Image (cartoon, helix red, strand yellow):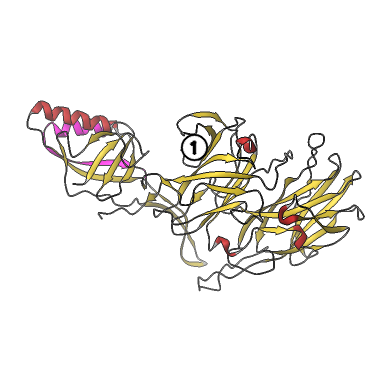
Amino acid sequence: MATWAFVADMASATPAVLLDLNQAGLRVGLDWNLSPPQYDKSRVGGPLRHGQQVTRSFAGNRVLSIPLEITQATSDASAQAIENLSRQLAVDNILKVQFGTNPVFFRTFADPEFAASVRGILTQNTSIKLEIEAEPFAYGPRVTVTGSPFTVSNNPAAGTNPCAFDIASVLGDVPTPLLLVATSTGASGAPSGLVNRWAHFATRSRGTPSGYSNVIQAESMTLANSTASVADAAMSNGNRITITPGVTAMSVRASGPFPSGGVSTIEARGLYRVYARIVKTIYTDTWDVQLKYGTSTTDCVANDVVRTPVPAPGNNGPWMVDLGFMPVPAYSDPVSLGYSGVSMKVQMPVVSFWAQRVAGTGNMHVDFLYFTPADESTVICRFPNTDTTYAVDGTTDAGGSVYAVTTALDEILTTASPPQVVGGGGFPELVPGRTNRIHFLRNVDPNGTVDAVFDTTTFAAYYWPRWREFTRP
């Protein structure tokens, strides 16, 4: 027999039952309807284009239609069954439905007026068709991501999980938020590596995320104007470039194509937030840096000039410096050839790093440029100051939050500063049927807190699959 029951939570496939609709004097009939939600759409049209364009489309709430009978033999028992049912309908609730091995859960909305109506109808009739409003999508039990936990390196040249990790084979048929739990961080496994840090999370799910690289090692670029490549075991790929002030004006120091190597791919298309990992040999020096991009170092778009931070005494870096956004391609993008629907390959012919020492006597080291996707879900958030386990939770009704938790995930210890959504849709989401690459830059603190390139962060990853289409198996 199928399971229809109001339950206490969605923490597991077998939560505590509040009211079983096939027991306690109740029985669900066969003529139920769990049709997908309708979509609310807006359209615009005009004399210059045949047809209309859809400018807005989102799922409305779902209505669960469930025929129900009272099966008690006595009036007192029937009255108790009616009361039990009405109380569940009068509050926000969770309805578990299961026909085969795996259940789904609907998050239903309180309807005290309908609950009162149900009382009245069932005192005169033995059957009724419940019409229960619920969230648009059905949820599956919580899934632990295959391969979790992931140990993510700060080093984009690392052999495994270099500033990112991949999640594939996602269940469901609509995107669903991701819950990440940082269970250990730092080179030694201590969680102190995240305390008070501003971290950047971003998602790329289009195409094959591994089809291109999001990093350009500085030493692989074409160098100019008092810039040289230097071996350095403390840097990514064992190398860096050093800029000496032989040319003191703002000038190009390194340039090259994106993706590195100059190979066009469909995956390179998109908007990116670009970071440079730099060191000032004398922390009190004043340096300006700038990102430019286009067809050459002269035919280019120039981002705003960025003044590097002046941190605490003795803190020379390295730091991640935000160079602003970069679209690929730089200008108008047809995306596909005519009406073919086949995406065309793209690249940025030249990305150039410019720098100027405004005051001081030292040099600047540059390790790499990192291109963080900014056109899907992406967020910068600060971790709490409690040295413990952290949750990066995109599942909350508020749209996402970061907090410190116990290792049992049953107690909040400290909440973080409000996250900054920096484009896209906020906290990371997973798209079924695709490989989802989650990018993670552990420290993009504008105040210049140092973070070693070989340190790591370990994430356990979870999600609740969401279903739009749900029919009898």
Q: Is residue 438 above or below residue 337?
A: above
Q: Is residue 190 magenta?
A: no
Identify residue type, mark 1: Ala
Q: Position of residue 83 (x, y in %)?
A: 20, 28
Nearer to me, 237 or 275:
237
User: Which quadrant holds residue 96?
Assistant: top left
Residue at the extreme front of the image, as rendered: 188
Label 1: element kind = loop
Q: Which residue is mark 1?
A: 398
Quadrant for the C terminus in the image: bottom left
Which residue is located at x 31 percent, y 53 percent?
A: 470
Furthest residue toward top: 76
Of all residues, the one furthest to the left in this rendering is 73
Region rendered in magenta: 113-135
Report the front residue among 85 and 436: 436
Q: Give the residue displayed 26% in from the left and 47% down from the top.
A: 98
Of residues 93 and 13, the one nearer the viewer is 13
Residue 148 x/y as whole percent:
49, 48
Locate residue 419 relative to residue 365 in the image: left or right: left
